[in-house]
Image (cartoon, rainbow, N blue to C red):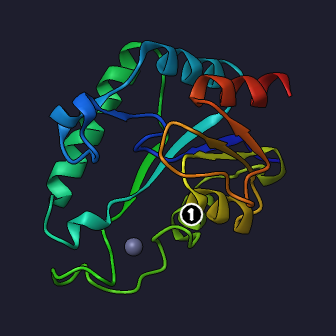
Amino acid sequence: MGSKAVFLDRDKTILLPKGGEKYIYRVEDFHIPDKFIGALKKLIDNEYLLFVITNQGRIARGHLTENDVEELHKCLDSILKQKGVHISEFEYCPHNPRGTLHPYNIVCECRKPKTGMIDSIRNSYDIDVLNSWMIGDSYIDMLAGKKAGLKTIQVLTGSETYSKYADFVETDLVKAVSKILIG
Ligand SMILES: [Zn+2]
């Protein structure tokens, strides 16, 4: 029957940019509110596996490197682990067909709204898809989630307007988690 899971977008879903910056590139650029960590802990306590899936196509434009992404994930992982939150996998897509940097400037199967990152996780974990969720701030997260058969919640901590692929719209991660747990 498999495990329930929540697939989480990263930027402007679980991480907020620091100091009015638009993008999160490196460790020094992000902020995670304590209440967001608390919300993730509630999912763990209710036996959801957590996966972070993030498009980092700016690698293909030369704004950051895979090493920067991995450093950030290591740092985030250690912050979360101290509070009892285990992320089962961090997956990122470094590609962007409009990028300039070889070998990243390709059409790939992992860049959301494609489902490659979700599919790859499902190949390694036994996931109960019908009881699993995608949370993200953008329409591409909602579309990827829908295509993968997940229930979707759009959070309004990004700049996107309401997506027709969202099953629910909530103000932030805390409210999204309440939706999942309370219904
Ligand atoms: Zn990709």
State the image quarter where residue 163 is shown: bottom right
Mark 1 crowd level (few <14, some 14–19, many ≥20, 10 Å Cα): some
Q: Position of residue 145 (x, y in %)?
A: 67, 59
State the image quarter where residue 67 is shown: bottom left
Q: Residue at x 27, y 48 (%)?
A: 23
User: Quick one: 139 or 132, which is closer to the camera?
Assistant: 139
Q: Residue at x 61, y 22 (%)?
A: 174
Check disc 1 and give the amino acid type. Ile
Q: Quadrant of the C terminus?
A: top right
Q: Residue at x 48, y 23 (%)?
A: 85
Is residue 151 depicted above or below 6 in this figure? Answer: below
Q: Position of residue 157 (x, y in %)?
A: 50, 36
User: Quick one: 135 or 48, which is closer to the camera?
Assistant: 135
Q: Along the horizontal axis of the image, is 3 left or right of 1?
A: left
Q: How many marks?
A: 1
Q: Which residue is mark 1?
A: 140
Is residue 14 depicted above or below 97 in this figure? Answer: above
Q: Residue at x 37, y 24 (%)?
A: 32
Q: Quadrant of ligand 1?
A: bottom left
Q: Position of residue 120 (x, y in %)?
A: 54, 65
User: Quick one: 174 or 47, which is closer to the camera?
Assistant: 174
Q: Position of residue 78 (x, y in %)?
A: 30, 25
User: Quick one: 183 or 169, which is closer to the camera?
Assistant: 169
Q: Give the SS element for disc 1.
A: helix
